[in-house]
Amino acid sequence: MEIRFADIELLRYKTPAFDTLSLNDKLYIYHLAKASLYGRDILWDQNCRYNLRIRWMLENILLDSTVSHDDAGWQSFLTYIRQVWFANGIHHHYSTDKFQPSFSREWLLQAWNSIPTEKHTPRLTAGEVSLLTDVITNPAIMPKRVSQKGGDLLQSSACNYYDETVTQHEAEEFYASLKKTAPNPDRPVMYGMNSRLERDDRGKLWENTYRIGGLYDKNIRLIAGELESARTYAQTPLQKKNIDLLLEFYRTGSLDAFDRYTISWIGETQGTIDFVNGFTEVYGDPLGLKASWEGYVNILDTEATHRTQVISQHAQWFEDHSPVDDRFKRRECHGVTALVVQAAILGGDLYPSSAIGINLPNSNWIRSVYGSKSVTIGNLTTAYNQAAKGNGFREEFIPNHDIRSLINRYGDICDDLHTDLHECLGHGSGQMLPGVDADALGVYASTIEEARADLFGLYYIADPKMYQLGLIPTPDAWHANYYTYMLGGIMTQLVRIQPGRDIEEAHMRNRALIGNWCLHNGDAMHLAHTDGKTTLEITDYQTLRRQIGTLLAEIQRIKSTGDFPAARNIVETYGVKVDPILHAEMLRRYEALDLAPYKGLINPRYTLVKDSDGNVTDVTVDYTETYDRQMLRYGRQYTAS
Ligand code: ZN
């Protein structure tokens, strides 16, 4: 552990593959990494329109304020600025609730005013300072970044993808009419993905597009500059071409250009270095249209990739034997590229809290025609697994010695395998019935999609084929994965929820849905109560697997037919509500362990080494930068302001 504050723990990940690369490859990564970091401020602004100015204000206080560093106010301030850095803004990265600092408005103003005038950040006027201190300390202002329920979702969300005056109804109408007039309805672009929906002087809605010469012009120019430098060191001609296509997208903001880039990117499989750079995931928009900026760079891990290649080679077998209705199966499974990689840098919405598996693109028609690229990020998993060893969690929540020792032996291997199955096969499996709108499931779409991929993984990790293919070490090792999955979905993930709250985040809803549905629709497992402690007992793993198959078939039916009422019903019944008594117990037991429920990662730092003539002779990687220093450096170095 590097640093701990609030509900957060920071870890360090290492990129051992970097040291084995040629200078050319190292320079390719060096520039791609910078391109990944230059998008940081875009994300901050997307998350909330006050975020950047608040960060400047807080960093100015941290560096230059002369208030006492010994009092409680300063300690609260340190926690707060670290939380804001972590979340890329003033709202929690996961719950999206606004942070409530424990210093007062008065303390904050005093800290600001104690900065010697010549050191004050010149960008903030007195009026702005007053406004920003209100935004920080008044819980009634912008309480939620992404609102999922109740009234107008745009009006109740603080995210910055729409003008403040734009209503949910207006935005939905705007994009519905764009879709209706699509020139190529079978191959729709990702409408709205790279723009802010604004209102002009006459009240008419228009899209302010993220591009050179448009919104985020300066930031995108900096990103493009590094991409151009990287282009020189590309490993393959297709990588060069892909950078050109991405640059065209950044210049024009054209969504057709983005699709052309995406299709070409899927086809590049010869190089050992790859990257994502752009507007990617839509979790930050309550309407699921607008994509947040993210960037990362990875290096292929050839040894570990063997495992996922075995899975991919059998993709059609898995599809043919899945328990879903034949109408919803994909006739031809192709383009499933499954790789294990090491992250070299994390940026934008992947930093400091990162996914451990990534499957792109998100465009449904491109996926079905051209396939997708899937990666599991092995070096991040390694960092998490190391941190989880011996922290007391398993002893507390898995009292059964037999299953605990199975998990200690095979848990990590099985979790990796489940992630591989989720990413390589799950998301790529199945097909929509003709004519079904890809957005038919609305706010439930993400939860249903994640449930589908998880169920596919759960169903097949238990298949005898896994042992035959040499992917799991013993025929029953998968029990470890079933136990930890169900334990998480039904019980232990509740420690991430505030008392009295519902489950909101899509991946958490999906895990609760699967766990609770299986608990209440069969007798393969039950909750036991001894000495005031609830324990999960799984008594029949084969029956549980059959239940998983039944649920997978139903979730696939919901997705393939766009059955919105069924999606709403199953998510609301099993994935949203929290049993308050169980919840309180989980929080109490978890608190006694004194663990941080959320983890994030500190990036490596890359530095050019030059000889006396100024020629670059090497790129070094360093793992010693502290969290605070990295955040302050990024704020200085990777900003367009
Ligand atoms: Zn997923």
Image: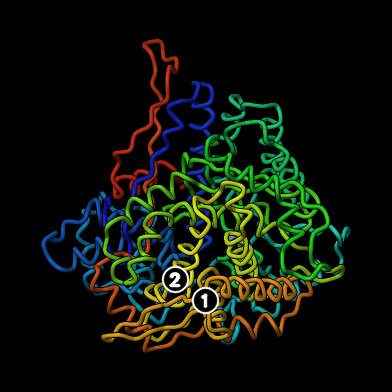
What residue is shown with label 1? 515
Q: Using residue 555 as the reference point, say whether residue 90 is left or right of it.
A: left
Q: On the rendered structure, is 238 left or right of 99?
A: right
Q: Position of residue 284 (x, y in %)?
A: 55, 66
Eyeballing the image, is 223 above or below 428?
above
Q: Residue 619 in the image: x percent, y percent?
A: 42, 25
Q: Nearer the viewer, residue 614 or 276?
A: 276
Residue identifier under label 2: 488
Is residue 228 at least partly visible in the picture? yes
Q: Residues within 10 Å of mark 2 (few under 14, many from 20)?
A: some
Residue 396 coordinates in the image, percent (x, y): 29, 71
Going by the image, does 245 lie left or right of 141?
Answer: right
Quadrant housing residue 68: bottom left
Whether tag 2 and tag 1 are in contact, CB under 8 A, the answer is yes
**Residue at the top extreme of this rendering:** 613
- Residue shown at the point (43%, 87%) measured from the top left: 579
Helix, strand or loop for disc 2: helix
Residue 270 pos. (x, y %): 67, 31
Between 590 and 310, which is closer to the camera in this rendering? 310
Q: Is residue 222 left or right of residue 530?
A: right
Determine whether the beta carbon of the residue marked 1 sits less than 8 angstroms from the nearest atom of ligand 1. no
Camera-nearest residue between 128 and 408: 408
Secondary structure under badge 1? helix
Do we see residue 277 in this rendering? no
Q: What residue is at 56 percent from the left and 72 percent from the top?
A: 510
**Residue 194 occupies quadrant:** bottom right
Amino acid type of the residue that numbered disc 2 sits on in the rendered structure? Gly
Three-letter code for the amino acid on which mark 1 is drawn: Gly
Residue 28, numbered circle: none
- Label 2 or label 1, whichever comes before in sequence order: 2
The vertical placement of 234 against 360, above or below, is above
